Amino acid sequence: MTLKFANNASSTLSSSILATDTSLSVAGADAGKFPSLLADDWFPLTIVDNAGNMEIVKVTARSGAMLTVERGQEGTAPKAFVVGSKCDLRLTAAALAALRDDLGSRMDTDPTLAANSDSKIASQKAVKSYFDSTLAAAIDAIKGGVSTAFDTLKELADAVATKFDKVGGTLTGNLILQLVSPMLRLNHTGVNDWGILNHTDGKLYVQKLNGTPANALVIGVDGSISTAQFGDLNARIEARAVAWANDRVANLQYRKVSLGYNGISGGYSNIGGTVVVGYARDAGVSGQVNGLYYMYLQVFDPVRGWVGFSG
């Protein structure tokens, strides 16, 4: 079987596929980016969705944008993918192995090399030796094997895998995004798309990015907060407080209750929270005041009801 390649062959699924499907369609405008295949031709295709699910398939035929595929290649499992998932022709371990085996087969059947003469095409013999040793070991290392020639690269890959896993994991250190107006984007499978933006104006924006874009929440450097629904919260709180105070003043009520009498005998006493409503005096010529009539004063509080004064 002949392996085919093409530069920048990338597209997206034009319709969803199940794990059991053996054909898929890419975007019609991208069909020509992928190789044309004859009998026994093939190329690798990697499918990745927004959640990081990945599968490698083997494309064995192409009719326009329709690709015939063999599912679950190179240790990946067949999965269902939604429309819009990425489809890329990538260089895979199996593709590298196929190149190695193809070149090695050609050299093994070359009559010049078969004669094993050091005087004939020494460069071809050197190439074959390279493929049989160094490159073969490199391919094994890419596939997860151990190769002394690739220990450093493999160790680096292992270290990166333990520090930051693309498909999930725990980040235990600080994550710093340092550029002009950096944004952290949170995309829920293409349905809900939100961004947290550190803008050049010094404000922090929580933005809805899909549908009708909007600044759902804005936090200023002074701690001010504004939302799409309520506007400036500080101004709204002040307006509500003023309206509430004005309403209480406009609806202020008071009443007098519980008539009492404070006589002169023994001296007048101070009775807090009352108002004088009358007095009594001697019927004689002197007209001396003998006592005061008083009532307790109450005001109406919308929260607590009628409240008396004290002191």
Image (spheres, rainbow, N blue to C red):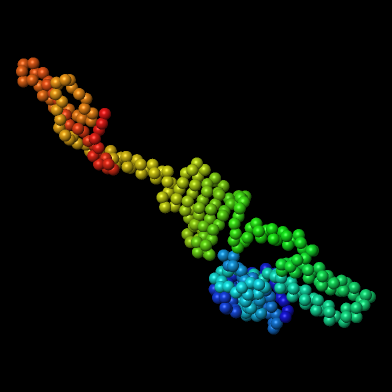
Vertical placement of residue 189 versus 289, above or below: below
Q: Which residue corresponds to the image point at 69% horizontal and 83% vertical from the top-left? A: 39
Vertical placement of residue 301 versus 12, above or below: above
Image quadrant assignment for residue 92: bottom right
Specify the farthest residue to the right: 119
Q: Which residue corresponds to the image point at 54% horizontal and 61% vertical from the top-left? A: 187
Total marks drawn?
Answer: 0
Quadrant housing the C terminus = top left
Whether residue 32 is visible here, answered yes or no, is no
- Left/right placement of residue 86 relative to residue 250 reads right
Q: Which residue corresponds to the image point at 47% horizontal and 59% vertical from the top-left? A: 212
72 and 106: which is toward the camera? 72
Quadrant housing the N terminus = bottom right
Specify the farthest residue to the left: 284
- Left/right placement of residue 304 relative to residue 292 reads right
> Residue 199 location in percent, x, y?
55, 49
113 and 162: which is toward the camera? 162
> Residue 303 location in percent, x, y?
28, 43
Q: Which residue corresponds to the image point at 60% horizontal and 59% vertical from the top-left? A: 169
Image quadrant assignment for residue 13: bottom right
Specify the farthest residue to the top: 286
Whether residue 154 is visible here, answered yes or no, is yes
- Left/right placement of residue 114 relative to residue 29 reads right
Specify the farthest residue to the bottom: 39
> Residue 80 location in percent, x, y?
56, 73
